[in-house]
Image (tube, rainbow, N blue to C red):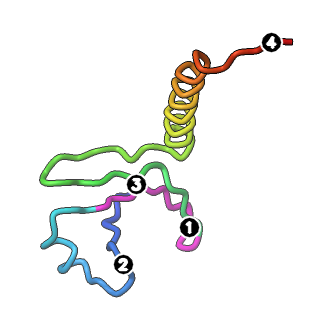
Amino acid sequence: EQYELVPLSPNMTYMEVAQGPLFTIRHVLRSSPTNIKVLGIYYVLEGVIYKSPSVRSLMKSTVTKTLMGLSDACDSLSVCARYQP
């Protein structure tokens, strides 16, 4: 297992990244020089280490917030709607 400092852009060197307020760290498992498995991604912002969220958790959060907003909008509009068959 290894940890790698990942530059923000392909053109930046590690020294340029080290001077900025944001670091990205990739936790990897190397089974060979060409076979790399990413175990986790972390970022350091102003000296505090955070684990990056997974795509699943980001999507779940976004969908939940959207559904809550739609539910509130439907509740607000339901008082305006009248159905008379």
Residue 14: x %, y % from top left = 24, 77
State if disc 3 and disc 2 touch (CB < 8 Å).
no
Residue farthest along the front direction in this orientation: 84
Residue 45: x %, y % from top left = 20, 54
* Residue 25 drawn in magenta: yes
| Viewer-side residue, 79 vs 11 | 79
Quadrant the C terminus occupies? top right
The residue indicated by pointer 1 is 32
Give me the residue at 22% from left, 74% from top: 17
Measure the C-alpha gap from mark 3 to mark 4. Answer: 62 Å
Q: Amino acid at mark 4?
A: Gln
Question: Label 3: how many residues lie within 10 Å, few (<14), some (14-19) or many (20+)?
Answer: some
Measure the C-alpha gap from mark 1 to mark 2. Answer: 25 Å
Q: Residue 10 vs residue 34: left or right? A: left
Q: Amino acid at mark 3?
A: His
Q: Which mark is residue 84?
A: 4
Measure the C-alpha gap from mark 2 to mark 3. Answer: 18 Å
Give me the residue at 55% from left, 42% from top: 59
First in sequence: mark 1 vs mark 4 = 1
Indicate the secondary structure of the residue bearing disc 1. loop
Measure the C-alpha gap from mark 1 to mark 4. Answer: 71 Å
Residue 60 against residue 31 in the figure, above or below:
above
The residue indicated by pointer 2 is 9
First in sequence: mark 3 vs mark 4 = 3
| Viewer-side residue, 55 vs 67 | 67
First in sequence: mark 2 vs mark 3 = 2
Query: Which stretch appears magenta?
Result: 24-34
> In which image quadrant can residue 21 be found?
bottom left
